């Protein structure tokens, strides 16, 4: 839900180069995470994987903006965000042997379809833009699965996120300096960067990491599709936008799919009395 507020918050910095805004978000968020959690990379297991994951966090941002610059916001967003859970499920299966359930596969497919309908299909579809978006989805899957594996090995989730995003901040700092920082001298620009960094990055990924302690990473990745749903609802309630009946249907499908993914396996198959008995046991 916090990720879904980023687009609305970004409107405060209208006219800012989006790559510069994304770089500032990662730099601010990564520094806050590193300072709050004490990354201590050398004390964590699978340090090489975490370094690669930090690079992937930064590269995801660049691939995402390359995608929307070539094939439009709608198509680029749907492909990048929609492919992320699919790649995550496949990587988790290949690396951990966690075969996704049929319910997860069906609900994820429905959620991606709902996301596609909600965000619309406008824009020119270009092969290079779609490839950048798919690369972004794969990068997201890589760093999500890597984080889950390190956390599963016993590392504190907060410290894992601090190491990953602290490293990503170091990678993105030259990008921020290259794209220009003069907009950060304006109160609106600075406020936007701080909100995006502290809330939609640092706080959001602290919560995400803690969720990975008990939630399969493929399920967590699908639940992240709540982002476009929250963004759409904020557009209606805060920005005065209107949803077409088709977009509203996509939002409803997306919401129902997320509920289906969030339910524990087997919970729906038990009668209410049996659920109570199971809880008592």
Image: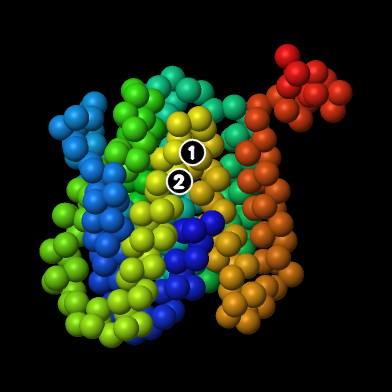
The residue that mark 1 highlights is 211
- Label 1, residues with CA under 10 Å away: few <14, some 14-19, many ≥20: some
Quadrant where the N terminus sits is bottom right
Where residue 204 appears, x then y in whole percent?
Answer: 43, 52
State left or right for residue 62 relative to residue 241.
left
Q: Give the distance between the C-alpha atoms of the residues marked 1 and 2, in whole angstroms.
A: 6 Å
Q: On the image, which quarter does residue 236 sit in? A: bottom right
Q: On the image, which quarter does residue 121 sit in? A: bottom right
Mark seen at residue 207: 2
How many labels sit on residues? Answer: 2
Q: Residue at x 55, y 66 (%)?
A: 231
State left or right for residue 3 relative to residue 109.
left
Q: Find numbered disc 2 in the image and state the secondary structure of the residue it sits on.
A: helix
Where residue 64 appears, x then y in whole percent?
Answer: 35, 60
Q: Residue at x 15, y 32 (%)?
A: 42
Where residue 3 appears, x then y in whole percent?
Answer: 47, 58
- Label 2, residues with CA under 10 Å away: few <14, some 14-19, many ≥20: some
């Amino acid at each position: 839900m916090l990720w879904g507020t980023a687009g609305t918050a970004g409107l405060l910095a209208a006219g800012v180069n989006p790559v510069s805004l994304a770089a500032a978000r990662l730099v601010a968020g990564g520094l806050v995470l590193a300072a709050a959690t004490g990354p201590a990379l050398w004390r964590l297991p699978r340090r090489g994987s975490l370094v690669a994951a930090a690079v992937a966090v930064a590269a995801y941002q660049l691939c995402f903006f390359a995608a929307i610059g070539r094939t439009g916001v709608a198509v680029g967003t749907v492909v990048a965000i929609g492919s992320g859970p699919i790649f995550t499920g496949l990587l988790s299966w290949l690396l951990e042997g966690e075969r996704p359930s049929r319910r997860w596969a069906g609900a994820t497919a429905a959620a991606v379809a709902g996301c596609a309908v909600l965000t619309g299909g406008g824009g020119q579809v270009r092969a290079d833009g779609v490839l950048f978006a798919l690369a972004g989805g794969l990068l997201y899957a890589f760093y999500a699965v890597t984080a889950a594996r390190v956390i599963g090995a016993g590392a504190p989730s907060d410290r894992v996120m601090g190491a990953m995003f602290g490293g990503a901040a170091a990678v993105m700092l030259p990008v921020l300096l290259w794209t220009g920082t003069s907009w950060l001298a304006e109160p609106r620009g600075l406020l936007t960067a701080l909100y995006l960094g502290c809330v939609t990055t640092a706080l959001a990924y602290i919560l995400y990491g803690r969720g990975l302690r008990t939630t399969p990473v493929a399920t967590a990745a699908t639940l992240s599709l709540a982002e476009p749903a929250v963004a759409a609802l904020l557009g209606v309630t805060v920005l005065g936008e209107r949803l077409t009946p088709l977009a509203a249907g996509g939002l409803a499908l997306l919401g129902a799919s997320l509920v289906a993914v969030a339910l524990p396996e087997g919970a729906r198959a038990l009668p209410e009395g049996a659920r109570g008995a199971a809880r008592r046991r």
